[in-house]
Amino acid sequence: MGLALGFPISDKWGIQVGAGWSRKGYRIDCEPSLWETTCGLKIDLFESTILLDRRVDLGGPVLHLMAGPFVGSALTQEDCLHLWDCSLPWDYGVALGAQLDVALFGNMRLSAGPLYAHGLRTSNAFVSRAENTRTRTLTMRTGLSYPIR
């Protein structure tokens, strides 16, 4: 859940600034037990993106191709396993996505598309024994857009 604002630079280029809640998870090998051999952890992050937006007019619908960095911060200390690991509960990386805008009525448009975010930070601040674990999410973003001119 979040909000994104787009700012045009030219007819074909823009910047999209977004912020929202994201739930990321890990699946790591744990000590074998009677019922399971893997463990999981879910982390709630407040995430911000700044995406370069390349708009392609398809004769009605508009396709947006987006790429740029994201940064996220754990919402609670409980999202970390150990207090000493939570001194910097940050995640950062790159995001890539596409979005299709279709006219509904007037200037109101329906927007939908995927956004993939890949963390670049080794995330042992969140999970112990995870030397090379990085976060990854694939989000389906949907919503209404309204251009302000």
Image (cartoon, grey):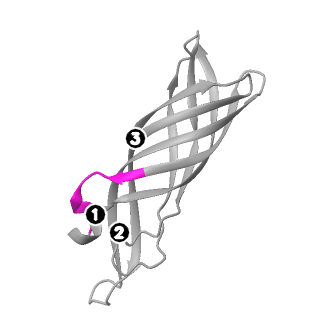
Image: magenta residue range: 72-80
Which image quarter: residue 81? bottom left
Q: Nearer the viewer, residue 5 or 39?
A: 5
Q: Position of residue 119 (x, y in %)?
A: 51, 60
Q: Is residue 92 left or right of residue 54?
A: left
Q: Nearer the viewer, residue 53 or 36?
A: 53
Nearer the camera: disc 1 or disc 2: 1
In the displayed structure, 102 sits above or below 72; it is: above
Q: Residue furthest front?
A: 87
Q: Which quadrant of the figure contains the N terminus? A: top left
Nearer the camera: disc 3 or disc 1: 1
In the displayed structure, 76 sits above or below 122; it is: above
First of labels 3, 1 by sequence position: 3
Residue annotated with mark 2: 125
In the displayed structure, 25 sits above or below 99; it is: below
Q: Is residue 82 visible in this depiction of the protein? A: no
Numbered mark located on residue 87 in the image: 1
First of labels 2, 3 by sequence position: 3
Residue type pointed to by label 1? Ser
Which image quarter: residue 29? bottom left
Query: How many numbered tags mark residues here?
Result: 3
Q: Position of residue 116 (x, y in %)?
A: 56, 52
Residue type pointed to by label 3? Gly
Determine crowd level at label 3: few under 14, some 14-19, many 20+ residues with C-alpha closer than 10 A. Answer: some
SS at badge 2: loop
Q: Is residue 16 visible in this depiction of the protein? A: yes
Residue annotated with mark 3: 20
Determine crowd level at label 2: few under 14, some 14-19, many 20+ residues with C-alpha closer than 10 A. Answer: many
